[in-house]
């Protein structure tokens, strides 16, 4: 029996829910889709390898959704703790208040992933093409402007 919450999504058809719960359980035991299909057939289920693939796609999307929700809830809890510590520091006015507040701010930034933020990669050629522009033409125009010949295209 799979642990509770292994496959939490409920379906109107209890047999569909049970099959997907079994698929999830077998997948976590590192069985291939073929091995999962074979194991289910031995248990009396009519499940092809394609069905198992579709089930796993749905199961993994559900796991990802649940993990994001769990992470969001955990971050919210940790932020609430930091906010409470910060509020207490302001009220109690310790001698090293600035150092404590700076540490809280650093922890909050780490928790929110602000230190890891990177600007999204931009494919300039693709962006220009979507606007109907050519980078070579733009470069020639800029070079003409820099050379003092703005009429050249």
Image (spheres, helix red, strand yellow):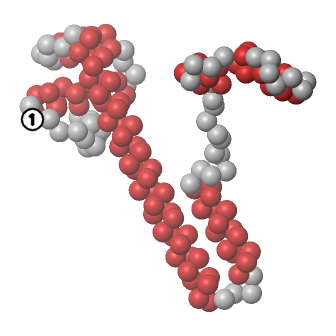
Task: Name the residue at the front extreme.
Answer: 151
Relative horizontal placement of residue 123, taking residue 78 as reference (left or right): right
Residue lying at 25% horizontally and 41% vertically, measured from the top left: 8
Q: Position of residue 47 (x, y in %)?
A: 18, 14
Relative horizontal placement of residue 70, taking residue 97 as reference (left or right): left
Q: In which quarter of the image is residue 129?
A: top right
Residue lying at 59% horizontally and 76% vertically, measured from the top left: 86
Residue matched to label 1: 12
Q: Where is residue 63 in the image (x, y as percent from the top left)?
A: 35, 37
Residue lying at 82% horizontally and 25% vertically, measured from the top left: 150
Q: Nearer the viewer, residue 17 or 132?
A: 132
Q: Is residue 118 above or below residue 84?
A: above
Q: Quadrant of residue 124?
A: top right
Task: Name the residue at the right extreme.
Answer: 147
- Estimate how packed mark 1 is, as few (under 14), some (14 to 19) or many (20 or more) residues with alpha carbons within 10 Å: few
Q: Where is residue 9 in the image (x, y as percent from the top left)?
A: 23, 39
Q: Which of 66 and 41 is in front in this view?
A: 66
Q: Is residue 138 above or below residue 59?
A: above
Task: Name the residue at the bottom extreme.
Answer: 92
Q: Position of residue 62 (x, y in %)?
A: 32, 36
Q: Is residue 33 above or below residue 148?
A: above
Q: Is mark 1 on a helix, strand or loop?
A: loop
Question: Could you tell me if residue 78 is visible in this image?
Answer: yes
Count the labels in the image: 1
């Amino acid at each position: 029996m799979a642990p509770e919450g292994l496959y939490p999504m409920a379906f109107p058809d209890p047999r569909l829910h049970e099959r997907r719960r079994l698929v999830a359980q077998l997948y976590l035991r590192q069985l291939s889709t073929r091995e999962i299909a074979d194991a289910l057939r031995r248990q009396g289920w009519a499940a092809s390898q394609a069905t198992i693939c579709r089930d796993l796609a749905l199961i993994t999307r559900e796991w990802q959704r649940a993990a994001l929700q769990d992470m969001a809830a955990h971050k919210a809890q940790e932020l609430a703790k930091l906010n409470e510590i910060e509020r207490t520091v302001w009220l109690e006015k310790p001698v090293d208040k600035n150092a404590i507040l700076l540490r809280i701010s650093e922890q909050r930034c780490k928790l929110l992933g602000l230190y890891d933020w990177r600007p999204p990669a931009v494919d300039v050629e693709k962006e220009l093409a979507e606007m109907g522009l050519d980078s070579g033409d733009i470069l020639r125009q800029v070079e003409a402007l820099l050379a003092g010949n703005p009429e050249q295209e």
